[in-house]
């Protein structure tokens, strides 16, 4: 087993965001079983949601302006809805949720970090390394898993667990690419994670 | 010659986008703008601010202590244009426009090609983030331009081994701090620049006397700063007012030393809480939606808005990241990396989420990545890129203009204190007819949700004798508080300017309402009630 894989496994072990879904297989399966229903409701909400009404409001400029020209009709229309949906999709992979806030569901209680936030700089270095070396396969996987969660309309770790694993992989690569003080950095990250994890247990029993 | 003409054209675009109808959009002066402008007016006529302090180093204003640069820059403008919105906003609009020229100069010094630098200057000229900040007189825009000037002179001093340029660099970095006290980023950037260029700065130590002389501006600006810091509440007040420790999402959960058990002290320590809360705020800035889609808050939540940049900048941005990783030199890469992480640092220590003004210091990071993108793309799409980018920028600018001039006023006129100018002007024209004029500090189309400072508008649009004002802190005849109809209706000759819901439950004869100001969403904003009428 290579050093990088060992490091990734270690980061998985010390990340609460990995353990919360894994230790609740019942709830996890329940969420997955509900996926078709989630999908139908999410789809209906997207194509007939309030955003379209707001676009129409922008088109005619409200009751006071009440315009009827071609340009606003072209601008505030379905392409803008599509772009907005694309941005919504990207939001499913926003680092803030994975590193600090969690999703607020049973799979990641609020105010506890799914991935220890001290890994964020290493995640960023790993991300840059991936772009630099043109390893696009993980970006494709990231897009696929994010899209699945987006289509289902559930921004929680039951569906975004693979994204969390990809992020941890990038963080492990970032950590591994340090030329000096690699062991000290790993030990510091582990110490912080242990503290956060014990804190999580303490909060649970309180 | 062609390059010169193109540079001037970009500069003209920047001036146009920042000054076109600047007096009318945003639809009203903010409280800060009105108050800063009155202080400049008072300075012009008496040499003292609204509190009677002669040529102050820092302005107490409405109690939040404003750095001096912006207010002093308004003095000539008010002397020329009078007490108008244009006079209050023009200086910063011009300073903001100047940034585009400085930006082009910086990029050339960082060895970006001329076409890439020009395209990146055009990017800044039409950037919604920078345009909006330049148009409404926020001091962050001055700080940002001075920061860029400091960087430009630093690069120039490196290239020419010039002490004079180094001295200018220190002057502008100091002015940046003196323009916006949240801008502690400037000293940090200066230290990083020194570190990154340490090998090329050896010339500074070749002439100790010259070095001492060139660092003189630093002392000239730093000594009064530290004097104010340690002897007055001027600088700490502002920092404390916006501190993350006052955030409603954090403050109630802090134990402030009173822990119930040792385990609580270990696992729920205030330091951990603060760190966790700060980390959430900090990472919130690394958000593509904020960067490219929704940031400015020009429309109501859920409506289409504009990001820090246009969405159409995204492909150039991605190309820039790619180019930086593969091609650019160590100095630039490290500088950009520093800017990327440090840019939102100061903003994340304050109360608000994703604060557009406080993160303005982050702008050069995006600019450098965009310039790298143009540098990468231009040789590959030599003919298509300039025309394509120009066309896309024009479309993006048109959409921004539609949101800015059509939707922003109708959605947010009341949040920009629309109505106080009209109230002040009406009251000023008719003040001889009344014994008292009462203007409410609370208003809003949906109820008493917005609080303003109407006296700042009366001071600016209906200025009393500044000497009399700073001696008495009173404006004759004016009272600023909510209307209490039971009591105030007994006043014989009074003009009451207040929101319609202040009269709910009372039967006011319509004949008493002499004037009305509506918000730009069509909702009634202020009723002007004359108590002397039957």
Image (cartoon, rainbow, N blue to C red):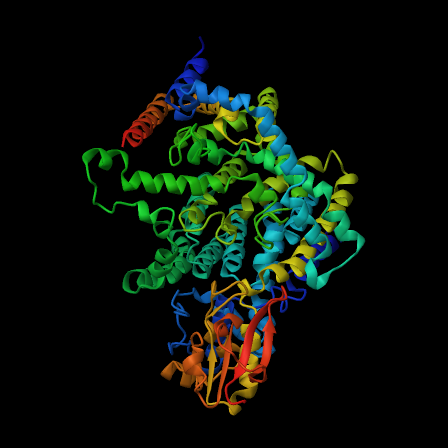
Q: Position of residue B299 (x, y in %)?
A: 60, 54
In which quadrant will I find the C terminus of chain B? bottom right
- Decide which of A150, B134 is in the foreground and name it: A150
- Decide which of B204, B462 is in the foreground and name it: B462
Q: Position of residue B231 (x, y in %)?
A: 28, 64
Horizontal side, residue A50 vs residue B226: left or right? right
For this orientation, the residue located farthest to the top is A1
Horizontal side, residue B405 vs residue B250: left or right? right
For the question of whether residue B75 can be seen, the reply is yes
Residue under the point 64% across and 40% down: A84
* Residue B239 quadrant: bottom left
Residue under the point 32% across and 48% down: B252
* Residue A13 quadrant: top left
Residue under the point 34% across and 50% down: B245
Rendered position, B521 above or below B54: above
Q: Position of residue B145 (x, y in %)?
A: 54, 56
- Decide which of B237, B174 is in the foreground and name it: B237
For the question of whether residue B78 can be seen, the reply is no
* Residue B369 quadrant: top right
Rendered position, B129 above or below B442: above
Q: Position of residue A44 (x, y in %)?
A: 65, 35
Rendered position, B455 above or below A115: below
Q: How many marks?
A: 0
């Amino acid at each position: 087993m290579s050093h990088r894989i060992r490091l990734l496994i270690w980061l998985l072990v010390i990340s609460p965001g990995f353990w919360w879904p894994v230790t609740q297989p019942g709830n996890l399966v329940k969420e997955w079983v509900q996926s078709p229903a989630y999908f139908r409701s999410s789809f209906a909400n997207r194509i007939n949601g309030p955003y379209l009404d707001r676009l129409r409001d922008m088109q005619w400029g409200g009751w006071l302006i009440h315009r009827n020209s071609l340009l606003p009709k072209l601008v505030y229309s379905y392409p803008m809805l599509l772009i907005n949906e694309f941005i919504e999709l990207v939001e499913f992979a926003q680092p803030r949720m994975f590193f600090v806030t969690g999703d607020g569901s049973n799979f990641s209680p609020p105010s506890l970090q799914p991935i220890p936030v001290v890994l964020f700089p290493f995640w960023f270095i790993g991300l840059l390394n991936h772009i630099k070396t043109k390893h696009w396969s993980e970006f494709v996987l990231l897009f696929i898993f994010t899209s699945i969660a987006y289509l289902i309309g559930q921004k929680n770790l039951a569906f975004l667990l693979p994204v969390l694993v990809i992020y941890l992989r990038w963080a492990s690569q970032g950590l591994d690419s340090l030329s000096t003080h690699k062991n000290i950095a790993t030990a510091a990250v582990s110490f912080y994670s242990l503290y956060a994890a014990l804190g999580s247990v303490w909060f649970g029993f309180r | 010659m062609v390059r010169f003409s193109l540079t001037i054209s970009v500069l003209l675009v920047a001036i146009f986008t920042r000054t076109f109808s600047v007096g009318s959009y945003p639809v009203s002066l903010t409280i800060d703008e009105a108050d800063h402008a009155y202080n400049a007016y008072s300075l012009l006529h008496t040499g003292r601010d609204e509190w009677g302090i002669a040529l102050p180093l820092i302005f107490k204003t409405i109690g939040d202590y404003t750095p001096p640069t912006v207010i002093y820059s308004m003095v000539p403008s008010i002397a020329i244009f009078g007490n108008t919105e244009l006079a209050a906003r023009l200086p910063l609009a011009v300073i903001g426009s100047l940034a585009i020229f400085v930006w082009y100069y910086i990029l050339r010094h960082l060895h970006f090609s001329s076409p890439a630098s020009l395209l990146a200057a055009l990017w800044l000229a039409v950037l919604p983030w920078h345009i909006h900040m330049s148009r409404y007189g926020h001091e962050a825009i001055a700080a940002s331009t001075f920061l860029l000037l400091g960087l430009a002179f630093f690069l120039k001093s490196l290239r020419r081994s010039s002490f004079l340029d180094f001295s200018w660099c220190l002057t502008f970095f100091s002015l940046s701090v003196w323009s916006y006290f949240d801008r502690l980023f400037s000293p940090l950037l200066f230290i990083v620049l020194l570190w990154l260029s340490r090998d090329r700065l050896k010339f500074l130590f070749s002439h100790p006397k010259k070095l001492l002389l060139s660092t003189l501006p630093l002392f000239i600006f730093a000594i009064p700063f530290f004097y104010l810091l340690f002897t007055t509440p001027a600088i700490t007040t502002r920092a404390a007012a916006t501190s993350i420790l006052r955030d409603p999402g954090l403050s109630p959960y802090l134990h402030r030393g009173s822990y119930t058990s040792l385990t609580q002290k270990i696992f729920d320590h205030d330091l951990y809480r603060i760190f966790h809360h700060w980390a959430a705020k900090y990472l919130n800035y690394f958000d593509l939606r904020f960067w490219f889609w929704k940031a400015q808050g020009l429309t109501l939540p859920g409506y289409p808005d504009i990001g820090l940049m246009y969405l159409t900048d995204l492909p150039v941005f991605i190309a820039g990241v790619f180019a930086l990783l593969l091609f650019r030199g160590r100095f630039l890469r490290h500088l950009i990396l520093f800017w990327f992480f440090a840019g939102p640092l100061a903003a994340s220590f304050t109360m608000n989420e994703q604060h557009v003004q406080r993160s303005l210091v982050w702008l050069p990071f995006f600019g450098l990545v965009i310039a790298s993108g143009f540098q990468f793309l231009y040789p590959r799409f030599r003919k298509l890129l300039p025309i394509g980018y120009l066309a896309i920028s024009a479309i993006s600018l048109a959409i921004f203009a539609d949101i800015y001039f059509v939707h922003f006023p109708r959605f947010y006129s009341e949040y920009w204190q629309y109505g106080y100018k009209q109230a002040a002007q009406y009251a000023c024209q008719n003040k001889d007819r009344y014994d008292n004029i009462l203007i409410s500090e609370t208003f809003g189309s949906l109820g008493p949700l917005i609080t303003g400072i109407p006296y700042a508008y009366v001071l600016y649009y209906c200025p009393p004798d500044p000497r009399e004002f700073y001696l008495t802190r009173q404006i004759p005849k004016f009272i600023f508080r909510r209307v209490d109809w039971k009591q105030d209706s007994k006043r014989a000759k009074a003009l009451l300017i207040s929101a319609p819901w202040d009269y709910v439950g009372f039967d006011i004869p319509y004949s008493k309402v002499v004037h009305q100001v509506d918000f730009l969403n069509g909702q009634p904003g202020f009723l002007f009630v004359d108590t002397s009428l039957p």
